[in-house]
Image (cartoon, rainbow, N blue to C red):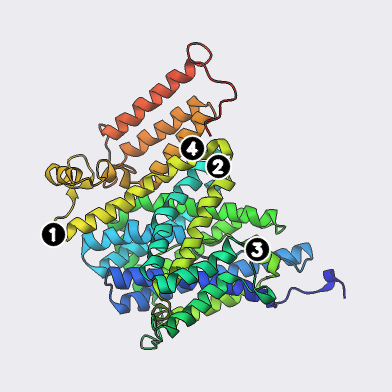
Amino acid sequence: MTKSEKRLTLFNRGDIGGLTYILANNIVNYIIVIATLSGVLGWPADLVYGRVIPGMSMGLLAGCFYYAYMAAKLAKKEGRTDVTALPSGISTPAMFVMLYGVIMPLHFSLKDPYLAWSAAVAACFIGGFVEFCGGFIGPWMKKHIPRAALLGTVAGIGFIWMATQGVFDLFGDPILGLPIFLVGIVGVFGGYLFPKRIPPFAVAIVGGIIYALAIGRTHVDFTGVGLFIPNPVTTIQSLINGFTVVLPYLSIIIPVNIYNFIETMDNVEGANAAGDNYSVREAQFADGISTMISAIFGGVVPNTVWLGHAGLKKTGSNIGFSWVGGILLALAGVCGLFTFFSALVPPAIAAITYLWCSIIMLSQSFRACDKKHYAGIGIAMVPPIADFLYTQVTGAVGLANIWTEKLPSGLVGYGSQVSQRLLDSGVMWNGVPAVKSGAIVIGIILGTLTVFIIDRRLDKAGIAALVGSALSMFGFIHSAGLGFYPTSQFTIGYLIMAVMCFILHAGRGKWLDTIDDYDYV
């Protein structure tokens, strides 16, 4: 029988590698969500395991099934049996932004886990709608916003939130973490394989759990296992109530989900380059709908198409890993198995996955961009650091029962006396509250400005500054909430910058010269 006469099987040997990939990475993401909501924020178990986790699983089930369907449809259309489904799951960068940039501030401001959850569900639904709209506007945005600005901002999030936490967790338990780290990077960065092409990364996760059990760093706990059927009727009412609470966080929610649909676009284009001609628009619609399904059932983080399609294609994965993975994750969520996984997998092992993911994001940013635009990536990476600093400083100061407040400038921070004491103590605080508000958008604006200046398009740089002024005027950036702020110092500052760009652009070749073949790198 010739290859063209073979049928695309529902599951084959090559799907085992793909199944390991999406299960391991999604499970680690679930564990991070559980650790944050239950461990850090202290949300009750019935909320985390009875609503959030099953809701996330319903969204993943929908996405995994649809991507398997897309692959089967493509295989039938082209008469091929080597089609690989798009890998998908929880968006790790968006997960961290939602947890630390939206849910955590909501929790501490509302002081009610159930109300904070309702707002988080609304945020997730809005994010899904933004992803869905990416099917219409994504190509336009990708054409007009430099890739360095988009990828640089996300690289900043990955580096400051994920890579640093990953390294710190490894050294928090060096007996466990460092050997696992070595095995993991041997495969991820060294390109080694164990016999029968077993990836060292999988060995690091599975072997690490066995090692942790052997030295008493973890344990098996079935006490949380049960049946948790999500109730969309209850969730929809909470979702509606949450819309009013979550509005001030639109400046965070919208940008991170814009990144999400652009990430989907890039990863689908990568799949196309590997030989599987998927519709970018259809994938963006699928991401948005599966994220909204997750929210309707109680989930709080968005879904996306993942990196790794080309690698899965090399292992011979087809569609089985996608639909089987969706079923297993759904069953784990509904049956409460993530309590078992949470107890079984210590932080040092979970750290390997998001350390790997963050470094891949960082290196991908530079690989995918023109060398001359590296400065744009670097500058775009800086604003997300403000989120990290803000969280660390306010958390530490809160131990002294000193809390942030809304300032006359429209920002949320500390009064002049506390701020000055922080500065006098050497704490990096000046400007942090201003950059923290809308950090992702600010990173995109600064990165875009830099790239246009490098390309000697000061006219386009002026337009980017005007966009910054408009966003400041309506409170999308540099503000605690949406509104109308025509006299904001940020609105005026960006406007001055725009005027300067247009004046400088008008003077090119007259009183403003350029250096030929200039290379700052």
The answer to which of marks 1 and 3 sits earlier in the sequence is 3
Distance between the alpha carbons at the discs numbered 4 and 1: 40 Å
Please, which residue is most extreme toward the right here?
1
| For the residues bearing labels 1 and 2, Cβ distance under 8 angstroms | no
Q: Amino acid at mark 2?
A: Trp
Q: Amino acid at mark 4?
A: Ala
Q: Which residue is mark 2?
A: 140
Q: Which residue is mark 4?
A: 375
Q: Which residue is mark 1?
A: 401
Residue 297 visible: no
The answer to which of marks 1 and 2 sits earlier in the sequence is 2
Neighbour tally class for label 1: few under 14, some 14-19, many 20 plus, Cα within 10 Å: few
Q: Which residue is mark 3?
A: 311
Neighbour tally class for label 2: few under 14, some 14-19, many 20 plus, Cα within 10 Å: few
Q: Secondary structure at mark 1?
A: loop
The answer to which of marks 4 and 2 sits earlier in the sequence is 2
Distance between the alpha carbons at the discs numbered 1 and 3: 50 Å
Q: Amino acid at mark 3?
A: Gly
